[in-house]
Image: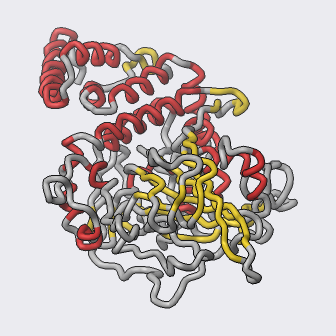
């Protein structure tokens, strides 16, 4: 039925009034001034679809959700850039043209599974992005025993750049149509979004589901320090996430995580609670195919893209580490230590020694191109086959410890151990402790190097040449895994209206 202008106008005005009323009510709850609200709404209302200038880019209900989101500034930026900047529009068109189907096991129904970001055109893609990130901004994860959905939106967005160089370029600040040129839209959007979501995760509203986590038996809350009010009540999710473990300052031990044989100077311990695997190199074959295998003669100083068998760029991974220290790791070995959402999120010294370098390298948080290989369905995160060279592009800390230990003849040997905590996806904060500076004496399994806040977290350990083998060696009585309990939480309904599975858990 075709409406006349006189008939349609009251309908439109009524819809606008209802939308504005809803927005105004939400704005009061979110602490947004009416002036800021009005300015944001008007800005978004006047954006046109660049693929069809006769149409507005955003419906009113989408505008309402955006302007009342704690992440509204980054969301408004993305929408505005797409509407006004031709380079951004062309970049997202290229991203959309290069989405890859998901691997087996990651969706319900018929295989192969179409990438959920695949859209009719770039405008539809941007609308999906705005919807997804609006929901993600205030997402609070659930837990049930061994299971949680803390990685849900992280994996959702990972499909955006899954084996998609254009998607990876976009989120890391490069132009997908000419990767030699910069394009800040994707990097600025994801960086600003992460900061704004981080602020939300410090807010009172983020604490809503914290009791659910605190009282879950697999959190083992009794291992952690009580708050000043002598309770396990937390003011925000991040305050809970970065909870402090109980320590004994007199004996300099962590009672629930005792270091193995502290009197022996040649033992290396896990820096935190994690899933640990050897580092693996990615090999480029002559026919262009790629294979992966355990590092045999591993770390080399530089990456040369057209030469085989170069696993990791130490120059980039180690940041501003002095060249003479970087050289110590040429020919060395390494281990990966991946933290899961329900575990302890501080990291400690894996060895006894002296800090000879410490820095925080602030770069990106998104763009690991093969997330299913990084977080497989069997839960072995960072398993053999994972490409660690990509983490030279992520926000990270670098702490290098000089170690001394006895040789067989009683002499003293010297080596170096690097701890590289990496922040991945969403907030991805890496915080180094203030006292981790040059000359600091550190104790294995006790001295705290720093912590992560909510997001993907990884600690890469590197050993100087000849210091240690790149495999995990355990002793009798040491934990090697845990029995599963509980049922997987139901994943949230997401803006793109699809059913996917993450680590074998279906989203309903």
Image quadrant occupied by the N terminus? top left
Residue 420: horizontal and vertical position, in percent? Answer: 58, 54
Q: Which residue is situated farthest in the front direction here?
A: 410
Q: Residue at x 64, y 47 (%)?
A: 392
Name the foreground residue: 385 vs 248: 248
Residue 161: horizontal and vertical position, in percent? Answer: 56, 46
Name the foreground residue: 233 vs 353: 353
User: Which colour assignment does the render follow?
Assistant: secondary structure
Q: Can residue 367 be seen in the rendering of this structure?
A: no
Q: Which residue is situated farthest in the bottom direction here?
A: 476
Q: Residue at x 44, y 57 (%)?
A: 448
Q: Please determine whether, in this image, residue 236 is positioned above or below residue 83.
A: below
Q: Can residue 399 be seen in the rendering of this structure?
A: yes
Q: Residue at x 46, y 75 (%)?
A: 259
Q: Please determine whether, in this image, residue 237 is positioned above or below residue 383.
A: above
- Count up the numbered dots: 0
Name the foreground residue: 343 vs 232: 232
Residue 328: horizontal and vertical position, in percent? Answer: 76, 57
Residue 35: horizontal and vertical position, in percent? Answer: 22, 12
Picture quadrant of residue 28: top left
Determine whether, in the image, residue 96 is placed left or right of residue 211: right
Picture quadrant of residue 298: bottom right
Q: Residue at x 24, y 40 (%)?
A: 203
Q: Please determine whether, in this image, residue 249 is positioned above or below residue 19.
A: below
Image quadrant occupied by the C terminus? bottom left
């Amino acid at each position: 039925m075709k409406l006349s202008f006189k008939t349609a106008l009251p309908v439109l005005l009524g819809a606008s009034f209802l939308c504005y009323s809803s927005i105004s009510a939400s704005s009061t709850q979110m602490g947004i001034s009416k002036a800021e609200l009005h300015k944001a709404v008007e800005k978004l209302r006047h954006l046109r679809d660049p693929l069809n200038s006769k149409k507005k880019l955003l419906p009113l209900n989408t505008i309402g959700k955006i302007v009342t989101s704690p992440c509204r500034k980054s969301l408004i930026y993305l929408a505005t850039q797409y509407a006004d900047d031709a380079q951004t529009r062309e970049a997202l068109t290229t991203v959309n043209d290069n989405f890859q189907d998901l691997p087996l096991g990651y969706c319900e129904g018929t295989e192969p599974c179409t990438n959920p970001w695949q859209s009719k055109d770039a405008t539809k893609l941007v609308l999906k992005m705005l919807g997804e990130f609006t929901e993600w901004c205030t997402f609070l994860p659930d837990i049930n025993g061994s299971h949680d959905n803390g990685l849900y939106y992280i994996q959702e967005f990972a499909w955006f750049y899954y084996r998609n160089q254009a998607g990876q370029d976009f989120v890391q600040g490069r132009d997908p149509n000419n990767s030699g040129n910069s394009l800040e839209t994707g990097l600025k959007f994801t960086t600003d979004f992460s900061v704004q979501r981080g602020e939300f995760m410090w807010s009172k509203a983020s604490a809503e589901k914290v009791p659910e986590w605190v009282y879950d038996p697999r959190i083992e809350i009794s291992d952690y320090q009580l708050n000043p009010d002598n309770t396990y009540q937390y003011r925000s999710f991040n305050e809970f996430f970065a909870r402090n473990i109980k320590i004994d300052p007199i004996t300099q031990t962590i009672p629930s995580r005792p270091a193995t044989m502290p009197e022996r100077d040649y033992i290396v311990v896990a820096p935190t609670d994690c899933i640990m695997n050897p580092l693996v190199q990615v090999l480029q074959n002559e026919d262009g195919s790629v294979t992966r295998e355990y590092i045999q003669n591993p770390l080399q100083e530089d990456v040369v893209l057209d030469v085989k068998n170069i696993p990791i760029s130490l120059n980039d991974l180690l940041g501003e580490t002095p060249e003479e220290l970087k050289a110590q790791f040429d020919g060395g070995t390494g281990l990966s230590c991946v933290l899961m959402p329900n575990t302890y999120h501080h990291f400690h010294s894996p060895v006894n020694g002296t800090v000879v370098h410490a820095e925080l390298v602030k770069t990106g948080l998104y763009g690991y191109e093969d997330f299913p290989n990084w977080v497989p369905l069997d839960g072995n995160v960072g398993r053999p086959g994972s490409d660690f060279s990509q983490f030279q592009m992520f926000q990270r800390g670098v702490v290098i410890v000089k170690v001394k230990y006895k040789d067989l003849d009683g002499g003293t040997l010297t080596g170096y151990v690097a701890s590289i905590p990496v922040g991945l996806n969403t907030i991805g904060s890496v915080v180094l402790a203030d006292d981790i500076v040059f000359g600091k004496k550190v104790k294995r399994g006790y001295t705290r190097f720093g912590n992560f806040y909510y997001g993907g977290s990884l600690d890469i350990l590197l050993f100087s040449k000849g210091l240690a083998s790149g495999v995990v060696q355990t002793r009798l009585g040491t934990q090697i895994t845990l029995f599963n309990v509980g049922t997987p939480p139901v994943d949230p309904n997401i803006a793109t209206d699809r059913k996917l599975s993450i680590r074998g858990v279906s989203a309903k």
